[in-house]
Image (cartoon, rainbow, N blue to C red):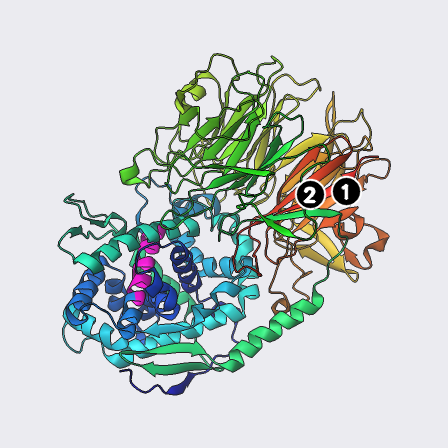
Amino acid sequence: MSAPMSKTVIFTVSLLSPLFCMISGFGPISHGIISYRASVYFGAEEFKIVQENPDGLFGGSVFPDVFYDPQCSEGNYSFVSDATKSTAFLNTSINYLLTKYPKPWSNVTHKLVSFLYGVLSHQVADYMWYGEDKSQQGFLTMMARLNFHGNFQEAAVFAELGSDAVLAYDLNLDHVKPFLEWFVPVSDLVNIYALMFGEGKVPYEVVENCTVTRLIYLMKEKLKVSEYYAAVAPNSPFLMTQLLDYFPGGVDDCAGWVIRKWNDLNFMFENGLSHCVIPSNPLQIQCNSSTTLQQSSFTLRNSVKKEAWKQVSASVYSSDVLKMQEESGFRLFPSDTYWREIKKKHQLFQKKRQRTKDLNSIGNYFVNNTFAKLGWALTSGDVDSDEYKDLLIGAPGYSVKNFPQTGKVFILFGNKTGLPGFGYIAVNLDNTTLNCTGYIKSPTKQQSRFGSSIAVVDINLDGVLDIAVGAPAFSNDESNSITYNGVIYVFYGTPKSRHFLRPNITISCQPEFCRLGSSLSTVDFNGDGHEDLVIGNPFYLPTDNQTGVVTVLVSKDTYKAQENLTFEQLVENWRLFGHQNNGWFGARSRGKDGVLMASEPFYRKCALPGCPLNSQDIQSAGAVTFNNTGSKFKFPSMTLNGRDEFDLTGYSADFGFPYDNTSLILAVSVPGAMVYGEILTIPVKLRWTGTVILFNVTTNGLVQVAHFDGDRKLALFGSFIKFADLNGDGFDDLLIGAPLHSDDWTDLIPRFLNIDEDGRLYIFYGGSNFPTGNATFTKDCLGFSPCPWKTAGDMVIPVSPKAYIGRDAEVLEYPTKTNLVVSAVRSTDYFRGFPHTGSIYIYTFDKK
């Protein structure tokens, strides 16, 4: 029987403390998100325990760090956090649980069990973040190399402080509101610590007070997330753009590994510890196995965390934290006053939000699959041989119970009038009763992210288009699935068929962390009139440091029904290598009209000969390489380099004819560029806003003719650019994406008014009115310049906030119409309760 519950006001939180005190970090939000994402696809019997006790899960996922705070008994109990983050704590806790609470478990015990799932999630994420990086390919190592001149300590402290800000601002977290409500089994924890350290070494009051202090910091982070984001994001484009998706060590990668280790924990709950090996590295826990595993060190873990706490410790003052006493512990949660403050911010923001320039929408597609990333990759081609283009959609985050991020590719089949649309009715692509959709499942149940890249090409020259799909997180050795070799599958097309059941060509990569399949495209490489498969691999390791390479699989009629090729063979035949270590050459590879374009977003301008990492380097300036493989245009083979730090020059590039049919125009994006604007005649600097530069390609070189500037800080304006004739008037139109566009102009407007971003896709129509010079300035800007929203012909704005629209788009032409397809990979389906599934929006244009 549960003890009577009482509610007590514990502390109050100041809303006006200085920003440097507020960036409290250590990723409590990040840990909560990781454990939640893991819980969605956790398929063991204990799934219901985790699902029904989220307060225990969230409490456990943040608890291991609480004793590092100097305000926690003057920092005298940091050794408790060290111990709680170790597998020794896990070992002791499981023995304690099985001894004191034999099955069947009561509801009270379920809280403890859910808490322990959260603790293991924290341990796994910590090891992914810090410890599992023998190959020097992990998230923090790469972040240090790309944005902190190789200084791991500085990067680690910054990332701990910044990960929460980026995730809380960039993601819609309405679905995890309970992450501010924690259950902590204090009585059980005191008993567990007594077994580890001796009676009375960790008093009840210390556990209670330190946990409350931690929740207060988290509440501050939630309330002041816009300020944190503004301070953090400009200093690390890697953290800003890769935190969710990079592997090893990004958020989604951690969530997948948490599920694996939760299954081992479930085995321990059922069978005890006698059949399990529990080394110091939680990633190497194995159950029902006699394998002896070596222990691995924990790189800089404790020193980094204590240093971070020194930087963020601050006095705590006003607003409420409430405590509800429960059997064996208590539940902490914010007061109604706090939630009213959050709601007020939302209401202020909602008043500002306004939709503009709606296009002719004919369709909206989704999947009932949380975190699917629908639309991560888009391409098109007539894959069913009916003479009309079909749309292929990658969903690399698509998951099933216990098998996260296996990935899936969806196909939307076109007809003579274009892609099918159902008006304002959103359609589920998983609906197998539709006669206009198809799919390709991953050939493996691994967390391979199948669908990260897609290309359509007639690789065997049989007259029928084939489909190539990348799965960069595939591991050759399934028993050690953190090798991430990557793989590319090619599925042969069959005349008049819509089925692609098994791959015919498999391209593998042997080195660990090769991550083959990150980028795919096509180009006529050898001038035989047939498109070939372009493979970009920014992580390839000819010098062990993510130099990157682009190679080609040539189309020919000699491929067998089953072929197994190696990436190394293709590289041996032909390759373009990046210009330096850690540049990520080939991160985006694209072919068009006999020109191969390859981005190198983290290219740096080196201060010293030989290019060793140096504090005087200009980091992440970016570069883009163009290779003429036989174009009919006089397009020079060349490399364009960025100028300033974090410019990310060449992140996207394209060429076309927006002015007339004789002037070939090259567009190059600089999404990290500083933009100089005005607000009511007041000059402002818009840092990390982005610009797109247009050049006339002449026989004498490049001549700049226009530049398009974004109007929001941190918007990544120019992350995606594409030339295409949408309205059939004979002129190419320019599409520019800004996936992190927000409704905040500058810091002149209080940041607390801005808690959201929507993303944008701008359309600038070609023809006689296509702009030159400063293309996003006009006297109609009304005192706010630049104003791309005013000079653009149309804009695409997502229905769902924080949808990341503007990352990718595809254009499909039909006899009388043209379809524009835009992805929103982080959109949330509010009506059906599926967060971050992703959506596909289809717009139609009549040809003139």
Cα gap from disc 1 to disc 2, whole angstroms: 8 Å
- Quadrant location, the N terminus: bottom left
Q: Quadrant of residue 312?
A: bottom left
Residue 171, placed above or below residue 575: below
Front in this rendered view, residue 167 or 602:
167
Query: Where's residue 824, x and y in %?
Result: 60, 49
Q: Position of residue 427 (x, y in %)?
A: 60, 49
Q: Tag 1: residue type?
A: Phe
Q: Along the line of sight, which residue is nearer the eye, 175 or 133?
A: 175
**Which span is picked out in magenta?**
114-130
Q: Residue 329: within the magenta?
A: no
Mark toward the start of the polypeptide (1 vs 2): 2
Q: Residue at x 66, y 36 (%)?
A: 668
User: Residue 249: x and y, percent?
Assistant: 39, 48
Label 1, on which residue?
764
For this view, does 358 lie left or right of residue 32? right
Q: Amino acid at mark 2?
A: Ile
Q: Is residue 198 left or right of residue 373?
A: left
Q: Are marks 1 and 2 in contact (CB under 8 Å)?
A: yes
Vertical arrangement, residue 147 with respect to residue 409, above or below: below
Residue 331 position within the rendered picture, expressed as x and y whole percent measured from the top left: 36, 77
Q: Which type of secondary structure does the marked residue at label 1 adopt? A: strand
Q: Give neighbour class at mark 1: few <14, some 14-19, many 20+ (Cα, 10 Å).
A: many
From the image, tell me which residue sits under label 2.
736
Residue furthest front as drawn: 433
Q: Which mark is residue 504?
A: none
Left-right relation of 655 to 139: right
